[in-house]
Image (spheres, helix red, strand yellow):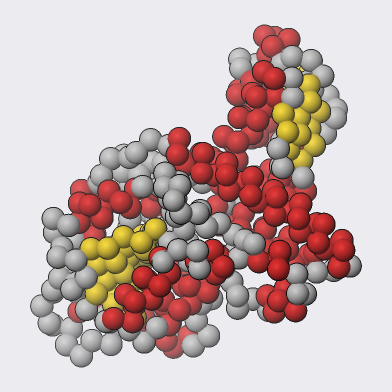
Amino acid sequence: MNRLILIGNGFDLAHGLPTTYNDFILWYLKKVFVTANARDGYKDNLIEISMKFNYKELYDRHFITLEDFIDHYYQVGFKEVIKDSELRNLRKGLIVSNPFNVTMVPFLRTLVTNCNFMNWVDIENEYYDALKQLLDLIKEQQRQALFELNQAMETLVSELRLYFKSLKKPIVSRAIEDIFSAPIRPRELNNSKNTNQKEYKPEATYILSFNYTDTAQMYANAAFHNLERVELNCIHGQANDHSTPLIFGFGDELDSKYSELELSRINDYFNFIKSFGYLKTRNYHSMLRFINSNKYQIYILGHSCGLSDRTMLNMLFKHDNCQSIKIYYHQTAEGKNNFTELTQEISRHFKNKEMLREKVVNFEFCEPLPQVR
């Protein structure tokens, strides 16, 4: 039997990397506002900033740095900065002038104003929701709105690559390394006829990473010392590898609205649908060859199992060769965990709930994902 390890954003977070949606968008806002202040303005496909006066005149009296200014309003509500009005410095109870004139495209404005409520996967969900809303427009309005939305996404993906390239490489965790080299345990295979059978090593281990970082690569390299066959597939690309595109967008072709996008006959609706991104590299077919080659057990390490990857996860989970799905859940210092939340997300990929219950390993046999301190 083989093992398929699904790596998601929670894996990077477990290593202390700042890879949440909020981390990225806060980095981007600091970058563009600092540039605007230095160059007396800034413009890309997401945002345009002009200066009323140099920020130094303000922060000398009320803030430490421009980054401090962005941090403050990102926490208390960035919509105040977007509006052309005076700002309240909540730390000191003062009213200060807004040095910026800011215009954001609707997509970025939605992301920024909802920053306290959204997580990483919701960026992709928000994009898909924006696509579906365009279906209510007349054809020519759809084309123009699609052009602008896709331009915004292109810029977002470019900035994502820059952000992930800027992150430091974490250290390898021995506790996490042990997960990669763990044996197959018959008790975790719900259809196993003999749960007393001895543990055994998987014949092959396939690491399917949905992240843009090189963190999974460190474990693929280390795992060669413990396992005979290990293969890494960075299905969404890597920020440091410019030879392949970053795949970012939505991946739920099973959604009821998806057929309406197809019937519109406007190809621009599919610029950031993941299935078309997968056709640009050999990674998807490599994964298909693996899951068709032998029975396998799935380990979930930090993947949210959300609908933005529904088409692929649906295939992996429901495949006849999939023998069980073991969750490595996130556990907080207070002892709370997200095991139930993850099983609820996984359930959305199964119409047959009996199959769901057969394949998902029960909580008693699952484990928390170690956190690198």
Displayed quadrant of residue 90: top right
Outermost residue to the bottom: 193
Q: Residue at x 79, y 26 (%)?
A: 50
Question: Where does the N terminus fall, quadrant-wise?
Answer: bottom left
Q: Is residue 222 left or right of residue 134?
A: left
Q: How many marks?
A: 0
Q: Residue at x 45, y 79 (%)?
A: 315
Residue 354 spot, x, y in % from top left: 44, 88
Residue 223 spot, x, y in % from top left: 20, 56
Q: Residue at x 70, y 50 (%)?
A: 151
Is 77 placed above or below 238 here?
above
Residue 368 spot, x, y in % from top left: 32, 58
Q: Residue at x 36, y 61 (%)?
A: 233
Instruction: Looking at the picture, tell me which residue is in the foreground, 41 or 333.
Output: 41
Q: Is residue 48 left or right of residue 337?
A: right
Instruction: Looking at the picture, tell me which residue is in the foreground, 75 or 99.
Output: 99
Q: Is residue 216 left or right of residue 174?
A: right
Q: Is residue 344 left or right of residue 105?
A: left
Displayed quadrant of residue 323: bottom left
Instruction: Looking at the picture, tell me which residue is in the foreground, 279 or 170.
Output: 279
Instruction: Looking at the picture, tell me which residue is in the foreground, 113 or 195.
Output: 113
